[in-house]
Image (cartoon, rainbow, N blue to C red):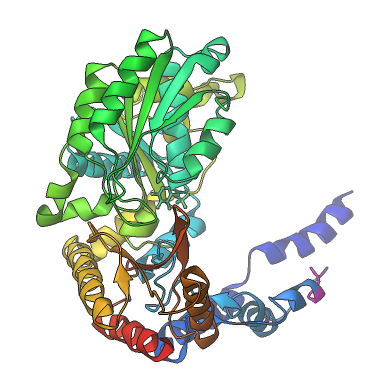
């Protein structure tokens, strides 16, 4: 047996690379990353690909490791080349992502040290760090000092946590679901509908509250609808508002909605996944007046804080409610339960073992400070305003004046189907590849969206987009 153990050990020890192997892998990975970053002006934003990364399937998982050069070449060709490059400053589609370099350093350290940041007992510093970041965001929103939340993988899970917590806090049982009423506009992000289904609330009643011409909820309609539902014996349960819709960046009138929800004792949730971090700017924060009236709020550091994908947050006023929905104990965890000074993420989230995602955010804020983030956000709003003015000079029709950094626009040709014409523009932009824009349909009208949220988007990229649009029409 000892002989077998020793034979196995010799192979298993490859899992701990020797210092010289580690140095080589570090060097090659760093070179790959540096090439990616240094060559940014050589990259296009969209690369039309015939094989769509399919050769990856002919690169089998080996019994024994392959040389790093071969592996990275496969990655480059099949994963980092085809289709959208979301790290590009020419990315104006959907909600552009981030990818500030310090995210990678934080993840690298989190992965190497592999701290168990889900439980206070195991990593009190890591738990304090994540809670500190949550409290920092709570302060930005105007929540009281006992508010907290959870760092999630993204906005969808943040919205899901808000729904399950609200459901339990309001004592909604399975038998009540068909009488539960939820209020939103047609512009609310689709992940909320998905979350309602996951939360066992698919059969609830959804009231789509009419919007004004700028795609914002009309509060008087909300008030009337709640009253009507109360009168007919239904259970008005939850109001959703958007602080920056995905389609147009519109911010619902949060103060009016909050007052109505609070007066009727209805859970008020704000989806600020896209727009939330604009509150870092005092001048932009005015548009979020009343956000502090909400019970919970979803916000995405992988959008407005320009971090790489994989970090969102749910902020919640009633921390006990979040705990009630998510905590659990198990016999094999008995050593981990001590009288903690700070709540453990594992008690505030569906996750137990989790990525120490707070480190990437903390490291980024510590190394660079808040100033460049705030400046970038203010810059993006102005760039969007600039685009909104300039694109009209090219003959495009525009949607509402942007609240934040998203504008919608379309070209109405003298003859022919305008929707088809604009669809063609979007297709041609993809073929060109220098910039990427996506589209949406609002009440049967096809709009091209211009969303500025990449930290790499500056005046030059916006002017390039305008120049290409000019060529195309
Ligand atoms: C992006 C977005 C979401 C979903 O968040 P993910 O991080 O993609 O899961 C929800 N709501 C709004 C307004 C968004 O922009």
Please, is residue 464 above or below residue 408 in the view? below
Q: x%, y% of residue 184?
A: 38, 35
Asked where in the image residue 120 lies, by quadrant, the reply is: top left
Please, is residue 134 above or below residue 52 in the view? above
Name the quadrant of the C terminus: bottom left
Q: Is residue 61 on the magenta stretch?
A: yes
Q: x%, y% of residue 311?
A: 42, 52
Q: x%, y% of residue 319?
A: 33, 25
Residue that appears at 26% across and 76% down: 392
Q: x%, y% of residue 284?
A: 15, 55
Please, is residue 303 above or below residue 48 in the view? above
Give the left or right position of residue 436, taking residue 372 as reference: right
Q: In the depicted view, which residue is nearer to us: 77 or 106?
A: 77
Q: In the depicted view, which residue is nearer to us: 1 or 405?
A: 405
- The answer to whether residue 82 of the structure is visible from this angle is yes
The mark tally for this picture is 0
**Looking at the magenta stretch, what is its main secondary structure?**
loop
Residue that appears at 60% across and 19% down: 331
Q: In the depicted view, which residue is nearer to us: 136 or 374?
A: 374
Asked where in the image residue 460 lies, by quadrant, the reply is: bottom left
Please, is residue 207 above or below residue 279 in the view? above
As drawn, the residue found furthest toward the left would be: 283
Residue that appears at 54% across and 78% down: 427
Read off the magenta span.
58-62
- The answer to whether residue 122 of the structure is visible from this angle is no
Asked where in the image residue 237 lies, by quadrant, the reply is: top left
Residue that appears at 22% across and 44% down: 136
Q: Is residue 341 on the magenta stretch?
A: no
């Amino acid at each position: 047996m000892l002989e077998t153990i020793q034979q196995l050990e010799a192979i298993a020890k490859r899992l701990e690379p020797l210092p010289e192997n580690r140095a080589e892998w570090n060097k090659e990975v760093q070179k790959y990353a540096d090439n990616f970053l240094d060559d940014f002006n050589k990259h296009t934003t969209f690369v039309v690909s015939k094989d769509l990364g399919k050769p990856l399937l002919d690169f089998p998982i080996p019994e024994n490791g392959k040389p790093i050069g071969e592996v990275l070449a496969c990655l480059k060709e099949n994963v980092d080349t085809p289709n959208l490059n979301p790290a590009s400053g020419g990315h104006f589609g959907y909600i552009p992502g981030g990818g500030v370099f310090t995210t990678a350093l934080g993840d690298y350290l989190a992965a190497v040290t592999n701290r168990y940041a889900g439980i206070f007992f195991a990593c009190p510093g890591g738990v304090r760090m994540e809670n500190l970041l949550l409290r920092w965001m709570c302060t930005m929103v105007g929540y009281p000092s006992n508010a907290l939340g959870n760092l999630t993988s993204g906005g969808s899970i943040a919205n899901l946590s808000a729904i399950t917590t609200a459901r339990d806090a309001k004592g909604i049982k399975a038998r009540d679901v068909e009488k539960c009423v939820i209020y939103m506009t047609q512009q609310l992000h689709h992940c909320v509908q998905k979350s309602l289904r996951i939360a066992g609330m698919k059969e609830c009643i959804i009231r789509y509250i009419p919007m004004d011409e700028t795609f914002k909820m009309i509060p008087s309609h909300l008030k009337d609808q709640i009253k009507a539902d109360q009168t007919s014996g239904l259970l008005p349960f939850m109001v959703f508002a958007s602080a920056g819709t995905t389609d147009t960046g519109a911010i619902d009138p949060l103060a009016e909605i909050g007052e109505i929800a609070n007066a009727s004792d209805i859970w008020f949730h704000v989806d600020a996944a896209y727009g939330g971090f604009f509150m870092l700017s005092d001048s932009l924060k005015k548009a979020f007046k009343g956000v502090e009236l909400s019970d919970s709020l979803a916000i995405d550091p992988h959008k407005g804080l320009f971090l790489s994908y994989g970090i969102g947050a749910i902020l919640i006023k009633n921390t006990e409610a979040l705990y009630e929905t998510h905590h659990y104990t198990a016999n094999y965890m008995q050593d981990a339960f001590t009288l903690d000074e700070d709540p453990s993420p594992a008690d505030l989230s569906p996750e137990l073992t989790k990525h120490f995602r707070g480190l990437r955010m903390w490291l980024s804020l510590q190394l660079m400070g808040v100033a460049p983030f705030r400046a970038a956000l203010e810059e993006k709003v102005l760039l969007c305003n600039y685009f909104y003015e300039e694109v009209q000079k090219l003959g495009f029709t525009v949607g509402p004046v942007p609240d934040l950094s998203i504008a919608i626009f379309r070209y109405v040709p003298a003859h022919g189907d305008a929707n088809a014409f604009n669809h063609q523009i979007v297709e041609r932009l993809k073929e060109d590849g220098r910039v990427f824009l996506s589209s949406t349909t609002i009440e049967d009208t096809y709009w091209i969206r211009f969303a500025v949220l990449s930290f790499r988007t500056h005046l030059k990229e916006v002017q390039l987009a305008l120049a290409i649009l000019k060529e195309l029409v």
